[in-house]
Image (cartoon, rainbow, N blue to C red):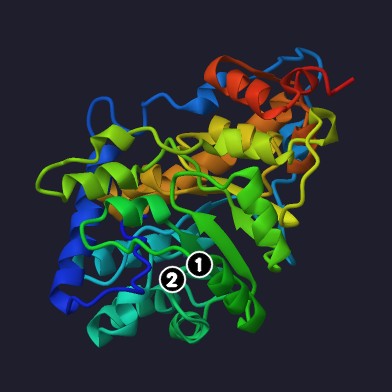
Amino acid sequence: MADQHSGKHQVDGPEPRRERKDDHLRLAAEQWTGPGAGGARRNEFDDLEFVHDALGGVSTSDVNLAARVGEWTWATPFYINGMTGGTDRSTEINTQLAIAARETGLTMACGSMSIALEDEEAARGFAVLRRENPDGFLLANIGAGRSADDAARVVDLISADALQLHVNAVQETVMPEGSRDFSTWLSGVAEIVRRSEVPVVVKEVGFGLSRRALARLAEVGVEIADVGGRGGTDFLAIENARRSARDYAFLTGFGQSAAACLLDAGVAGAATGVESARPATILASGGVRNPLDVAKALALGASAVGVAGVFLDAILEGGEDALSDVIKRWQAQLRELCGLLGAADIGALRDADVLVRGRLREHCELRGVDAAALARRSG
């Protein structure tokens, strides 16, 4: 989460890159702590409402939370999304994240590993992930501007089970030292997918993957994508805070939310009237604050849900024990929500009636999504 820089154009040395990493971590943490921060901030998940069926519940003991993601089965349908790495402080946080993932059986993606390709000391900061969690499911992380050889190197560094390949054109645009050439990203993604020895998950960093973007990814062989929508950690704000003039504030709110992207892509079901090519498996992240947000994303068709900011806040408040407690509570509460909603497994959440309101409803109307069909799909 705290640094998603692709690094293709970088010419700065290890120290400036480490300083940027710590800047990203500090500024991201500030968005998720204190009054009005991410844990309480409104986003478009609040425009979604389950229709309550008072007699439709099932026994919580019968609920199966297992998630099918590509060729894998994850025990829990939410996971620790990429955050940080490459500095002393981020190594400490990655160690705590890895321990919590090990203790709770959660899948974990690491932060951008580009810095590890040029800095041996930074590479050791990522290696702790596999050392602390030898049997867990780990995703390496690199930017779309890097080569297939670079992608293979970061996978090898942590013996990753999969590669999270992030796209971050908005962040790069605002980043003082960012790239301004995105013309080769899609062909680069295609090459990495073609040559990778592990499955590739293409992820936006917080501005959303549109219907058109998902179709393009499918065309080049991407089978798993994380829509990574607006509403969580705001990399536009982070990069603008690093600019002396703070002159990109006019872009605030750019992009689409995870909920909007899921609806736009038609993964909520054929009844919504959307027919478009897309990767076979769609993940969702961006602004997930609690188990109810997880359930809403699953109900809109996500196979699993990535969480970063709330988990980072727990680490900063109380270390790996605090995060483990949060994860275990979320697992129990999500199971209870499924029981309440009559879903014996997470796939059954796609049959739950969901009301779409407010700005999100307007998005559906403009994009040709039949939101009203979601309100009566249980019938």
Q: Residue at x 47, y 81 (%)?
A: 147
Q: Are marks 1 and 2 in contact (CB under 8 Å)?
A: yes
Amino acid type assigned to the residue bearing label 2 in the image: Gly
Quadrant for residue 190, please give it: bottom right
Ranked by sequence position, the earlier of labels 1 and 2 is: 2
Which amino acid is tagged 1? Trp
Circle 2 sits in a helix, a strand or a loop, which is it?
Answer: loop
Q: Residues within 10 Å of mark 1 (few under 14, many from 20)?
A: some
Query: In terms of depth relative to the viewer, which is nearer, 172 or 201?
Result: 172
Tell me, yes or no, if residue 136 can be seen here. Answer: no
Name the residue nearer the viewer: 119 or 256.
256
Task: Tell me the quarter of the picture where residue 122 sits.
Answer: bottom left
Rendered view: 106 above or below 356 = below
Give the numbered dot on residue 185. 1
Mark 2 Cα shell of 10 Å, populated few (<14), some (14-19), many (≥20) = many
**Quadrant the N terminus occupies:** bottom left
Q: Residue at x 72, y 34 (%)?
A: 60
Reading the image, the residue beneath label 2 is 145
Q: Is residue 281 left or right of residue 290?
A: right
- Residue 121 is situated, as x and y percent measured from the top left of the image, at 23, 83
